[in-house]
Each structure stands twice: as C-alpha cells, then as structure tokens.
C-alpha cells in the first residue's frame, strides 16, 4: 500500500513537473522518507543530430551537451526550461517496432508508453506541428479534464501534448 502511494505520488509529480518546473515529492516509504524529483527522460534514437534538430525546431529545446562513449555510442542532452531529455544513438540498435508507434496499440506492451508536455493551447500547437510535417499519431481529444493529442517525434516516439482545464 505504501509503495503504491509513493509510486502514485511520483507519477502525479511527473505529470505536474512537465509544465511547472522541477517538483520535489516527499512521501513516507517503508524505510523512511523518500524524496523524488524528475531529472530527465532518455530516448534511444537512430540519428542523434536529426533528433536534436527535431526537438529544437518543433518544440523549442536547446542542446546542452553532446558526447560519446566507447563502442560508438553518442549522447546529447537537450533542455527546455526544467525539462531535460537525454538522447542516445548506438550502432546497430533495433528500430522502434511499428506497434510501439501507435499510442493505442503500445499499451499492449509492458514498459514506458510515452511522455507528455503540458502546453497552453494543444490545438494551436498541433496545427503548427502539422504544418511543419510532424506526424500526428492521435488526433486532438477533449474530455472533461483536459485536451490532448499525441505526435510522433522523428524516431517514432510518442509525445503527448496536454492542456489541462482549470
């Protein structure tokens, strides 16, 4: 029960963190207090330069650093405000399977499904991204609490754009 509470708080913090800056969540775990703050999301991509360019051009990220490691792995850290994404390119890495490119189908596979950015106007941003040729994986949906859509980045990763109703 306590573990579920900690996980629920972490997920809640992640959802809020995207548009509000860094969040620090303190909760009582089995072994005492657990303090969490979201640091980054990591993505494996087929071409690091293309992915840096996509996130820069489409969503306004800035490149913070780029590096490499043994075996030909390349890395880049991009940032938009407090949101950080670490990109990895590895020689011979497998492509994202087609089933993982469709948010509705991807729920049938265990693991991380997508990440989301809170935005002020989902419809306007989706229209702007469509005009730039971005693939909309899940058209704009409105429910009582939010308006959201999913787009695909240049590597096929699902990115949720969400506008909470307040």
Image (cartoon, helix red, strand yellow):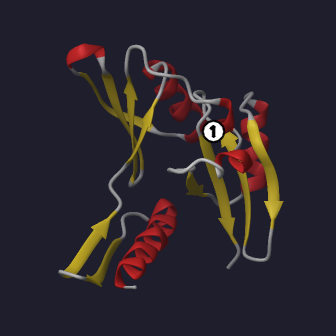
What residue is drawn where x is 36% and y is 70%?
A: 23
Side of 154 relative to 20 (left or right): right
In the rendering, at what x and y percent does residue 62 appear? 42, 36
Side of 145 relative to 57 (left or right): right
Asked if one can make out residue 160 in the rendered structure from this viewpoint, the answer is yes
Asked if one can make out residue 125 in the rendered structure from this viewpoint, the answer is no
Side of 143 relative to 92 (left or right): right
Q: Is residue 100 above or below residue 22?
A: above
Mark 1, residue position: 100
In the rendering, at what x and y percent does residue 112 appear? 51, 50
Question: Which residue occupies the foreground of this view, 148 or 98?
Answer: 98
Side of 2 relative to 34 (left or right): right
Question: Which residue occupies the foreground of this view, 136 or 32?
Answer: 32
In the rendering, at what x and y percent does residue 156 appear? 62, 32
Q: Is residue 29 above or below residue 54?
A: below
Q: Quadrant of residue 2?
A: bottom left
What residue is drawn where x is 57% and y is 50%?
A: 113
């Amino acid at each position: 029960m306590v573990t579920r509470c900690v996980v629920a708080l972490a997920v809640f913090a992640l959802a809020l963190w995207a548009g509000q800056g860094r969040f620090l969540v303190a909760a009582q775990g089995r072994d005492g207090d657990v303090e969490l703050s979201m640091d980054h999301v990591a993505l494996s991509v087929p071409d690091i330069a293309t992915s840096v360019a996509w996130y820069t051009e489409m969503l306004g990220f800035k490149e913070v650093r780029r590096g490499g490691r043994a075996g030909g792995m390349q890395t880049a850290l991009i940032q938009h405000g407090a949101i950080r994404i670490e990109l990895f390119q590895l020689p011979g890495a497998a492509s994202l399977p087609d089933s993982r490119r469709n948010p509705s189908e991807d729920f049938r596979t265990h693991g991380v499904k997508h990440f989301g950015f809170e935005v002020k106007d989902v419809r306007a941003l989706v229209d702007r991204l469509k005009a730039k040729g971005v693939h909309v994986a899940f058209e704009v949906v409105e429910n009582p609490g939010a308006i959201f859509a999913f787009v695909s980045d240049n590597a096929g990763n699902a990115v949720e754009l969400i506008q909470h109703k307040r």
